[in-house]
Image (cartoon, rainbow, N blue to C red):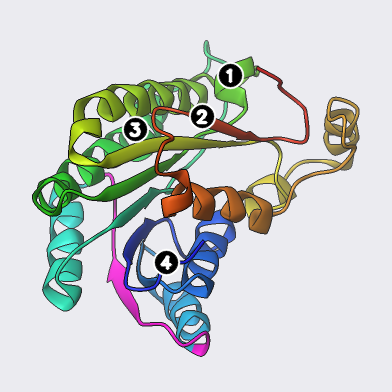
């Protein structure tokens, strides 16, 4: 999976899956633009990318703000002339039962997780269409496929992201642009670290492989879909969930 000469933009790149994706793409030869709100963490990821011999660009980015996304894409193109790969990874959770969920928590999660992906795709597509090449990978979630109590806003956003993936894939396939989603199960990240031990054990009983996944395993799937080896795959949801959901 050689990505030499490719330029990738990754949202939510400051930690967890986003950081792992940045390193995986850099290892394959891509230069990486790193977008997130935490600039200190981004600088640390950028150093790791550069230690791999690739270029890194740090972008203060809030995907919930159209202007911020537009500026990040413009800065990347200005620096490197193009964007070949977009990884929409930025995401937040604000969990609660639907009857207790505040409208602002619903709107905040949808705006970051779904609107942010729309803003990013819309911003990079003109360049991809012009160069007749692009790889867009959206990071969804297993709960978008199975449901989960207390996460109506998060699940709605990730299910919407899967629908967005399929719609855009159909629109841009003729321009040699593929659009796919990776759907992680329960991955050992800062987000899942907040779960109690009892909940973790319950989750283990639902996973045939009997363990949480790693961010590197998700990043491997992203790297594959971003490569030329996946050139005949589009509109697909690649499950990385240890067998928790089989479809």
Which residue in the protein does label 4 denote?
Answer: 3
Magenta stretch: includes residue 188 = no
* Residue visible at 18% across and 60% down in the picture: 73
Which residue in the protein does label 2 denote?
Answer: 237
Badge number at residue 102: none
Residue 231 is situated, as x and y percent measured from the top left of the image, at: 40, 43
Q: Nearer the viewer, mark 3 or mark 1?
A: 1
Q: How many marks?
A: 4
Which residue in the protein does label 1 denote?
Answer: 145
Q: Pointer 1 and pointer 2: residues touching (CB < 8 Å)?
A: yes
Q: Pointer 2 and pointer 3: residues touching (CB < 8 Å)?
A: no
Question: Relative to the observer, which residue lies in front, 85 or 102?
Answer: 85
Mark 3 crowdedness (10 Å alpha carbons): few <14, some 14-19, many ≥20: many
Which residue in the protein does label 3 denote?
Answer: 114
Where are the magenta residues, as a range?
51-64
Question: Relative to the observer, which residue lies in front, 201 or 214?
Answer: 214
Residue located farthest toward the top when viewing the structure as drawn: 99
Q: Quadrant of residue 35?
A: bottom left
Looking at the rendered image, the quarter that the C terminus falls into is top right
């Amino acid at each position: 999976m050689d990505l030499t000469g490719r330029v990738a933009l990754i949202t939510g790149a400051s930690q967890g899956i986003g950081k792992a994706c940045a390193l995986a793409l850099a290892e394959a030869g891509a230069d990486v633009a790193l977008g997130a709100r935490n600039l200190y963490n981004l600088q640390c990821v950028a150093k790791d990318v550069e230690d791999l011999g690739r270029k890194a660009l740090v972008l203060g980015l809030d995907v919930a703000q159209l202007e911020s996304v537009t500026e990040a894409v413009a800065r990347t193109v200005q620096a490197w002339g193009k964007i070949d790969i977009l990884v929409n990874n930025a995401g937040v959770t604000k969990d609660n039962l639907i009857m207790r969920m505040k409208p602002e928590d619903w709107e905040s999660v949808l705006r970051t997780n779904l609107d942010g992906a729309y803003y990013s795709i819309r911003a990079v597509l003109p360049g991809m269409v012009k160069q007749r090449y692009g790889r867009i990978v959206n990071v969804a979630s297993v709960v978008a496929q199975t449901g989960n109590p207390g996460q109506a806003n998060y699940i709605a956003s990730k299910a919407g992201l899967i629908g967005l993936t399929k719609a855009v894939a159909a629109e841009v396939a003729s321009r040699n642009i593929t659009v796919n989603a990776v759907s992680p199960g329960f991955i050992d990240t800062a987000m899942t670290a907040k779960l109690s031990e009892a909940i973790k054990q319950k989750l283990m009983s639902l996973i045939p492989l009997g363990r949480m996944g790693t961010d590197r395993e998700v990043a491997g799937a992203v790297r594959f879909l971003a490569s030329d080896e996946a050139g005949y795959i589009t509109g697909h949801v690649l499950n990385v969930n240890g067998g928790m959901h089989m479809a």
